[in-house]
Image: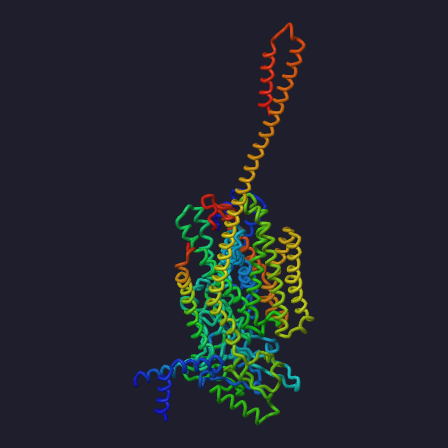
Amino acid sequence: MSGETSTVKRTLITPFNVITGMIVLVGLMITVLRFTKGLGAATNLSDYHPWGIWIGFDLLVGVALAAGGYVTSAAVYIFGMKRYHFAVRPAVLTGFLGYLFVVVALHYDLGRPWRLPYPFIMGWGTTSLLFEVGLCVALYLTVLFLEFSPAPLEWLGFKKTRNLAVRLTMVLTILGVVLSTLHQSSLGALFLIAPSKLHPLWYSPYLPVFFFVSSIIAGLSMVMFEGMLSHHAFHEKMDETHLTESDSLTIGFGKAASLVLAGYFTIKIIGVAAGNHWDLLTTPYGIWFLVEIIGFVALPCFLYAVGVRDKNVKWIRYTAAWTVLGIVINRLNISVIAFNWHLPAADRYVPHWMEIGISVFIVTLIILFYRFIVTRMPILYEHPDYQGGGH
Amino acid sequence: MGISRRKFLGWMGAAGMAATVGKSAAASSTGQFTGFPDSKAVLHDITRCIGCRSCEDSCNKVNALPGPDQPFSDLTVLEENRRTTSKSFTVVNQYSNTSKPEKPVFRKIQCNHCLEPACASVCFVRAFTKTPVGPVTYDPDVCVGCRYCMIACPFDIPTYEYDEPLTPRIMKCTMCAPRIEEGKLPGCVSVCPTEALTFGSRKDLIKMARERILNYPDRYVDHIYGENEMGGTSWLYLSGVPFHEIGMREDLGIKPAPELTSGALGIVPMVVGLWPVLLTGIYGMTKRKEKIASNEKAAAVSDTLKRANSEAAKKLAAAIEKERLDKEKALEAAEKRKEKAIREALEKAAAKKEEDAADSPEPDNKKVHTTDDTMRSEEDS
Amino acid sequence: MNTRITREGDINQMNETFYTLHTFMLHSESVTYFLMLVSLLGILGFWLFLTARDDDHE
């Protein structure tokens, strides 16, 4: 990590390197403060608000946006969309880095992070949904590591191990979808225990379903959004297939995202109906809820549809960015904004700048690692020795 | 009686243990859990509380907590709306009395020691235990510090040592579990000067509370807070004013906390059991479809090839035929031309013969030459 | 007869162990987690058994 940043600094003084260098430096300083003075010194967390953006953004948003790995590998290997095979590796890499840094970020938030394995070695608090989330994230991180492993193995030239890893593709893909279904939904189910604290428009017995369905949307949109960024940054690293097929992928995924958004919109409305909370829609929280549902669910659903009908790749990619923002808003609504809504303003939580600093630091690290790997390993192109293998 | 019951159960066991076990499980799934028998509880009669803060003082000493910012004798702090903190497991708040404004109401806040604690339900290391005696205890030796218990608690009771960098703990009232073990009263109960706090068996206390409501219907609201809230708590409250007026939530419902998550937990094994079947099925269908498609493609390719081959053969045959016909035509034409040329030559020769009949007899040379020309024209075509 | 008494004891324990929904769920969920692990491995093995004689087995 520090080696990577220092080499980046040594090679060139570009705006990218200067900015990332500063973020990393500030991040490291906050890290020292957090682990020497405690959570109180670096966060605005309180006894009323024990979870801030390190859970709301780093964990909930992080996991949702890392869903591209399971969505893409399921589309290609299970549903047989082999045309999109070129997109599996970048998606799995993002998923792997996403989950890896979710776990890293969790170390900041936990009181005694070195006890992270305790649930499985001494706790077995099986009635807790957090236990289920922890178990699934731990297993899925392993699955993603194995799914990703062919790339570094090709890079390092370990042919036999690489072929062994490739042979596991189907089993890993199915296991990945099972584990993702479970923990994506369970992240929503975490809040089922607190009906008295979460605003009724967001609290619903369907929370796990909402989280799972929106994770598919997040995964699809993230793959497209990332494709857009990669095309700007790593164009020269892409092979012929990647360059020519990525438009068709964007249109295909855009169509899928539009359809899933339509379903998500429907079940969100049904959620309001099931709780009979129509009257709350005219309150300030209700209007914010409508902004989320109409502005960040119905609107992108329609925009995707327009983009797909017009075959307008650029349009679809901007819609993807908007949808990703919608997912961020949804997760923050549930964990921070609409949580403890009944408390007076003085007792409410507003993140400390250092909390935001760590979140930015973590995102920067993901980008740096992604760049390090993509510029070295066969991610955006097929390794010449393993072409046409289907994997 | 005991023996016959034992025999009966023995027979039941012999007849079918599965059925008996099934029965008990069915009873469990309908939520028929009554809690530990004879567990202890505390009844807080809010109408008797005078807001003296002795309980806060005692709690502080018993639990060896750091000293307060203001001494416990300072009653001005009652005017603030306080909550439990990592340095105070219990606080007394003052509330205005809507019916009798001259007589403010005081309420003591601390852990309610739920019969089905939400904190225990959500703890992934089982740091919280509902003991058979009554207290909900916490074990800092396994705590990871995730603070999910604080999210889950409907009463906002657990607090956290945010300023501890390495060994932060969840801090909350223990109901003085160690003191109860020794046969002593909880710290707060032991010092209450007005008997606003009563310690005893939960069943007895509920009876006592009912009697008080029955005997003094004007003094009390007809509700024992904690009898059923969140599945029941080991801290029970009687009040003279509606509970929501003194900061106690009446919208929590009577569902025990674990029931809120049991549905979601129940889906987990269904997903694990059925998702692989569904996904493998879809994979199988995809693969089959691909195979059929590739077979069809192969067939189509070979068909096209065949058709292409036969067409090519036809074309070739036609070309050969055409060539043959052309040749024939050309031959015919050549023949005709030849015949014509011969005829002309013969005619010429005959004419010349007639002209030069007397002086030059050489017609054969010219005839040969004409035949050569015809030969050449045949080759050109 | 002895075994019957033991069984009776077991049944009594089954009926009396779980005073709270929480402890009951701790027990049943722990069993469920164990069974989930078994089923995941089991379905993989079963799939291999099911498809072992397929013509197009790779």
What percent of the width, then of the height, locates residue B150? 53, 71
B133 left or right of A311 in image: left
What percent of the width, then of the height, locates residue A174? 47, 60
Q: Give me the residue at 61% from left, 22% from top.
A: B339
Q: Which of A42 and A55 is in front in this view?
A: A55
What percent of the width, then of the height, locates residue C25? 46, 75
Q: Which of B83 and C57 is in front in this view?
A: C57
A96 left or right of B380 in image: left
What percent of the width, then of the height, locates residue A123? 42, 69
Q: Give me the residue at 65% from left, 57% from top.
A: A305
Residue B248 showing in the rendered view: yes
Q: Nearer the viewer, residue A205 or B138?
A: A205
Q: Quadrant of residue A216?
A: bottom right
* Figure coloring: rainbow
Most extreme residue toward the left is C2
Q: Nearer the viewer, residue A118 or A296?
A: A296
Report the number of discs.
Answer: 0
Q: Is residue A353 above or below residue B99?
A: above
Residue A24 showing in the rendered view: no
Q: In this view, does B116 lie above or below A90?
A: below
Most extreme residue toward the top is B359
